[in-house]
Image (cartoon, rainbow, N blue to C red):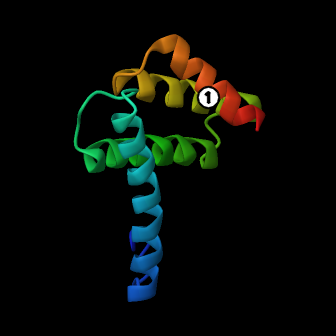
């Protein structure tokens, strides 16, 4: 990812990655604007979330979860803890994540 595997990224590759990050940044900005997250630089929270999610994915790919349900449980906990750490209320964060997974 991002050339870390020795693959040279093209401008098109970087554009796709930048678009993905902008979508995530826009979601974080909406959470800040709605008062769910405390005031912060949206890019900082976006990069933190990206790193946490991809670290969790790396553990999954390396077989550290074993049971797929463990990865799902860990991912939900990650999202909840990230949201609370960013300023959201625990009950609201849990409800939002439950709703997202139910959709």
x, y (%) of residue 29? Answer: 36, 45
Q: Residue at x 39, y 74 (%)?
A: 3
x, y (%) of residue 12? Answer: 45, 86
* 98 or 68, nearer to the observer: 98
In the image, taking residue 41 as reference, residue 45 lies left or right, namely: right
Vertical relation: 45 (above or below) 78: below
Q: Residue at x 38, y 52 (%)?
A: 25
In the image, taking residue 29 as reference, residue 103 lies left or right, namely: right
Q: What element carries label 1?
A: helix
How many marks can you see?
1
Q: Residue at x 38, y 87 (%)?
A: 11
Vertical relation: 89 (above or below) 13: above
The quadrant in which the C terminus is found is top right
Question: Residue under circle 1?
Answer: 97
10 Å neighbourhood of mark 1: few (<14), some, or many (≥20)?
Answer: some
Vertical relation: 25 (above or below) 95: below
x, y (%) of residue 23? Answer: 46, 58
């Amino acid at each position: 990812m991002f050339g870390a595997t020795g693959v040279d990224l093209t401008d098109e590759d970087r554009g796709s990655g930048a678009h993905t990050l902008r979508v995530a940044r826009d979601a974080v900005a909406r959470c800040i604007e709605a008062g769910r997250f405390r005031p912060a630089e949206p890019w900082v929270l976006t990069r933190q979330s990206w790193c946490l999610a991809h670290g969790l994915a790396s553990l999954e790919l390396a077989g550290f979860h074993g049971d797929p349900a463990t990865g799902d449980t860990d991912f939900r906990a990650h999202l909840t803890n990230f949201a609370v750490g960013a300023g959201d209320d625990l009950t609201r964060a849990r409800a939002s994540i439950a709703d997202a997974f139910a959709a």
